[in-house]
Image (spheres, grey):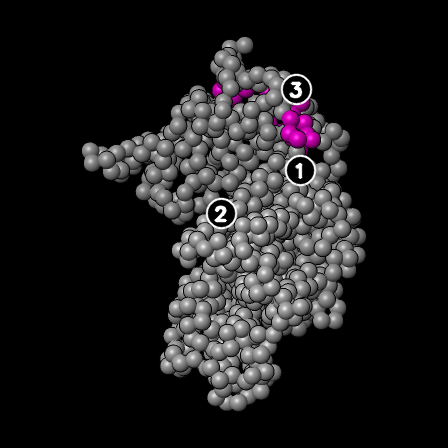
């Protein structure tokens, strides 16, 4: 018994109309890394919120170091040594690293003013423990995403936390940064007496770093503190989704000698892209791979006219075009963009399903004097919403009330409805559960088979290798490699990483 | 609006309607003359203007911005109209078209500067408020136009429906219906709302957000100019100070009506009939308090309290939306 630092027994949590957790158990061994897995809506976040004192369970008990506890606020949980590092950054971007680390307990001098020397000294101590080479006086917004993530962990450590909850910590990190993070986590567990709960959708990472696994499905335990060595990927997926995973591979015969549909020639942009050349064939899925900050999304936004192209040409069917705005792209050239950030750029969260799904087709559907009513829009978008199996009580439902997977389906549906010839798809499955993910993969392949040409941006290597026909690698706003995809994971990934690290 | 009664009951507008009825009852019983023909006619003339001003503000609040130059713009347009009719002898109908075009143009300036500079419309319209009003005072030398065509001033004092209602109110109510139609049943109306709700998402979905924002400011200028003409007709003259210094007198009702009506200050949601009911409520309280004879300062005090209350309501609405999304 005494092995466990944290134990949750038979936890049940009810929300109006939903049993989010149903007799769920969770035990965390001292000095271990424990994966908490499950599909969206399986109850992971609810469990984490109970551990961190955001929610109180309706039934069941929580033991910390074998003592029964009940936290009435996140602050209490934090004082008891439990810290969460969220997907969203919780640092104040305009403050320095030191100020952020010491925020809850800023040292003061005799005059009652903040003693910045001590701030720097104290925070340096924690950065050193993590072997992080960051000056505590650096402003947070000047750091890379990866370093911000590490600072968050340093902040948690500085609060003397013994339990760290990491929620999708690698979703915006490059493979190299992920590797560094994992090395650090292992060291923390070994040297600092810390136990870690690790939440991730990327199963490769779970196998790489975790000791034990707990899987939730529909609020119940699908497995409980299983040794990772007893599992493999197939078994794990089956535990999560309740059936076997379907592996999808795009198999097509594209003649790469054919004429290009879209051709970027020696593009230089205001944002710093240098001499970008790439072409897209009809019906092709062209992958754009690169680390975060390689300039992929930025390139697409320049093509859409949101930022300035300084020189070079864009050809569509061998004719030079000038795209002034996304409106231009959609209406004149039938080019659409599915944003990576569905909450900020993809959807209007406060509006209903119908207006979100129909926004791209209003212009086409309008009648005389710009007349447009709901049923005209409904008739147009309904087939696509049905095809994507969007789960919503009605078209009047506000989109922010839907699950992440369904939101993503709507941000895809609106572009299907618009009937574009070329689609730029940016990180289509970030934070999406496995079922919806494989569904979206099938859909992307189906679209390309029907003749839509697709440029796919993803940082998920397995996704890239299963979907793309050809993969362009970008680094520092330049194209550094082009490979025809043979769908062999080992070969492709080493070739791509080779391009990046050359 | 909707046949399903339970849904309507839940809306903000229903709450407002109840409030309006409650206040009518209170003032009918507690004051003499509230229900008199004279008072109802006077009310209808005032409420007509408050509705129009509220709508003019509402269409800019839709973008998440605001239009402080509303009063100055409306008065400038009205003075331009007075000059057209009195000094230039331009026919009434053509004058009205010119005034509305002029108002839209001033609104276009607000919108164009806001969009191009990226500065919040609060600052831009604070500046243009001063510019429009200053320029107008300079050109008119602060003199009123009092010799307007009789046909024009007669319209302002016309009494309809057994002499209970001013035709100005009919113009305002018709405007409500037109705006409701635009926002509910046109492509452009939907785009205006989408652009206001989430400019980034709207832009990437193929909507020209800058253009939509400029349209909103132009519409605001148009409606403010219409309000200016209506006020001129009501008092029978175009007077530089008819909306107070810098047009300040219009600002309180301009904010009160849409915010009470349920328009979100952060943009992306409009309620045309809510704004109408909000304006009615404000006018009622204003009028009732005068009749109870509590004194000018108390009226202002109460209107300020109501605005604060309405803003708290706005926050509550936003909180409610967020809470909803967290639970799911």
Q: What is the magenta segment's predominant secondary structure?
A: strand
Using the image, tell me which numbered label, if any, was put on residue A23. Answer: 3
Q: Residue at x 62, y 33 (%)?
A: A203
Q: Residue at x 42, y 75 (%)?
A: B240
Please tell me how crowded label 1 is: few (under 14), some (14-19), or many (20+) other residues with Cα within 10 Å. some
Using the image, tell me which numbered label, if any, was put on residue A433. Answer: 1
Q: Nearer the viewer, residue A478 or B253?
A: B253
Q: Quadrant of residue B119?
A: bottom left
Q: Please indicate, yes or no, whether residue A231 appears anywhere in the rendered image.
A: no
Q: Is residue B160 left or right of residue A245?
A: left
Q: Is residue A230 above or below residue B252?
A: above
Magenta stretch in the rendered image: A14-39
Chain letter, disc 1 residue: A
Q: How much space separates mark 2 and mark 1, taking CA atoms? A: 43 Å
Q: Quadrant of the N terminus of chain A?
A: top right
Please tell me how crowded label 3 is: few (under 14), some (14-19), or many (20+) other residues with Cα within 10 Å. some
State the residue position of label 2.
Answer: B309
Chain letter, disc 2 residue: B
Chain letter, disc 3 residue: A
- Residue A352 at x, y = what percent? 67, 50
- Residue A481 at x, y = what percent? 58, 54
């Amino acid at each position: 018994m005494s092995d466990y630092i944290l134990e949750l027994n038979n936890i049940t949590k009810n929300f109006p109309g939903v049993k989010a957790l149903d007799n769920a158990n969770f035990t965390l061994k001292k000095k271990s890394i424990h994966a908490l897995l499950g599909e969206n809506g399986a109850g992971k976040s609810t469990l984490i919120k109970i551990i961190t004192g955001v929610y109180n369970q309706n039934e069941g008990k929580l033991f910390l170091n074998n003592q029964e506890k009940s936290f009435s606020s996140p602050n209490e949980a934090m004082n008891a040594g439990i810290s969460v590092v969220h997907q969203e950054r919780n640092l104040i971007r305009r403050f320095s690293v030191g100020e952020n680390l010491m925020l809850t307990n800023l040292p003061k001098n005799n005059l009652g003013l903040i003693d910045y020397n001590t701030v720097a000294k104290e925070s340096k101590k924690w950065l050193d423990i993590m072997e992080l080479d960051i000056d505590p006086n650096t402003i947070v917004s000047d750091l890379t995403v990866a370093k911000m993530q590490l600072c968050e962990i340093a902040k948690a450590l500085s609060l003397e936390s013994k339990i760290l909850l990491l929620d999708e910590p690698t979703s915006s990190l490059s493979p190299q940064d992920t590797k560094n993070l994992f090395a650090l986590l292992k060291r923390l567990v070994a040297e600092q007496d810390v136990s870690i709960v690790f939440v991730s959708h990327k199963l490769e990472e779970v196998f790489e770093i975790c000791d034990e696994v707990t899987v939730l499905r529909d609020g119940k335990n699908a497995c409980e503190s299983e040794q990772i060595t007893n599992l493999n990927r197939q078994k794990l997926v089956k535990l999560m989704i309740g059936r076997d995973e379907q592996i999808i591979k795009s198999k097509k015969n594209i003649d790469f000698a054919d004429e290009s549909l879209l051709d970027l020639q020696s593009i230089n942009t205001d944002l710093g892209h240098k001499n970008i050349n790439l072409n897209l064939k009809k019906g092709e899925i062209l992958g754009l791979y690169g680390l975060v900050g390689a300039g992929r999304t930025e390139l697409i936004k320049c093509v859409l006219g949101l930022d300035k192209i300084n020189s070079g040409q864009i050809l569509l069917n061998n004719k030079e075009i000038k795209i002034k705005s996304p409106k231009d792209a959609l209406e004149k050239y039938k080019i659409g963009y599915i944003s990576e950030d569905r909450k900020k750029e993809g959807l209007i969260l406060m509006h209903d399903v119908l207006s979100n799904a129909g926004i791209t087709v209003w212009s086409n559907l309008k009648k005389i004097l710009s007349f447009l009513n709901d049923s005209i829009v409904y008739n147009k978008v309904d087939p696509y919403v049905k095809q994507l199996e969007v789960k919503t009580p009605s078209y009047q439902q506000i989109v922010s009330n839907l699950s992440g997977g369904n939101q993503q389906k709507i941000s895809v549906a609106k572009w299907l409805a618009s009937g574009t010839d070329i689609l730029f798809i940016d990180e289509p499955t970030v934070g999406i559960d496995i079922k919806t993910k494989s569904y979206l993969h099938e859909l992307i392949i189906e679209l390309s088979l029907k003749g839509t040409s697709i440029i796919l941006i993803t940082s998920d290597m397995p996704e890239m290798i299963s979907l793309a026909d050809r993969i362009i690698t970008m680094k520092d706003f330049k194209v550094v490699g082009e490979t025809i995809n043979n769908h062999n994971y080992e070969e492709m990934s080493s070739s791509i990483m080779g391009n990046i690290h050359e | 609006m909707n046949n399903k009664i339970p849904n309507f009951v839940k809306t903000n507008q229903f709450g407002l309607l109840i409030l309006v009825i409650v206040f009518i009852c209170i003032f009918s019983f507690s004051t003499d003359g509230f229900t008199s023909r004279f008072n109802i006619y006077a009310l209808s003339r005032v409420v007509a203007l408050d509705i129009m001003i509220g709508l003019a503000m509402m269409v800019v609040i839709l973008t998440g911005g605001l239009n402080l130059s509303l009063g100055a713009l409306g008065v400038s347009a009205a003075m331009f109209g007075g000059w057209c009719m009195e000094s230039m002898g331009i026919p009434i109908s053509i004058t009205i078209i010119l005034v509305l075009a002029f108002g839209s143009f001033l609104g276009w300036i607000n919108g164009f500067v806001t969009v191009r500079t990226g500065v919040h419309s609060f600052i831009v319209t604070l500046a243009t408020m001063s510019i429009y009003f200053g320029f107008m005072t300079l050109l008119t030398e602060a003199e009123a136009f009092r010799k307007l065509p009789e046909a024009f001033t007669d319209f302002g004092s016309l009494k309809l429906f057994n002499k209970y209602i001013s035709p100005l109110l009919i113009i305002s109510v018709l405007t409500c219906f037109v705006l409701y139609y635009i926002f509910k049943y046109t492509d452009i109306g939907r785009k205006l709302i989408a652009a206001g709700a989430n400019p980034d998402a709207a832009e990437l979905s193929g909507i020209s957000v800058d253009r939509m924002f400029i349209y909103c400011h132009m519409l605001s200028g148009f409606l403010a100019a219409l309000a200016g003409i209506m006020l001129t007709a009501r008092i029978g003259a175009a007077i530089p100070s008819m909306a107070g210094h810098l047009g300040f007198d219009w600002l309180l009702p301009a904010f009160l009506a849409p915010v009470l009506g349920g328009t979100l200050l952060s943009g992306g949601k409009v309620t045309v009939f809510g704004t109408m009911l909000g304006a009615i409520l404000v006018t009622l309280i204003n009028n009732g308090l005068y009749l109870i004879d509590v004194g000018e300062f108390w009226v202002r005090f109460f209107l300020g309290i109501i605005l604060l209350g309405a803003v708290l309501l706005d926050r509550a609405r936003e909180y409610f939306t967020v809470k909803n999304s967290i639970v799911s």
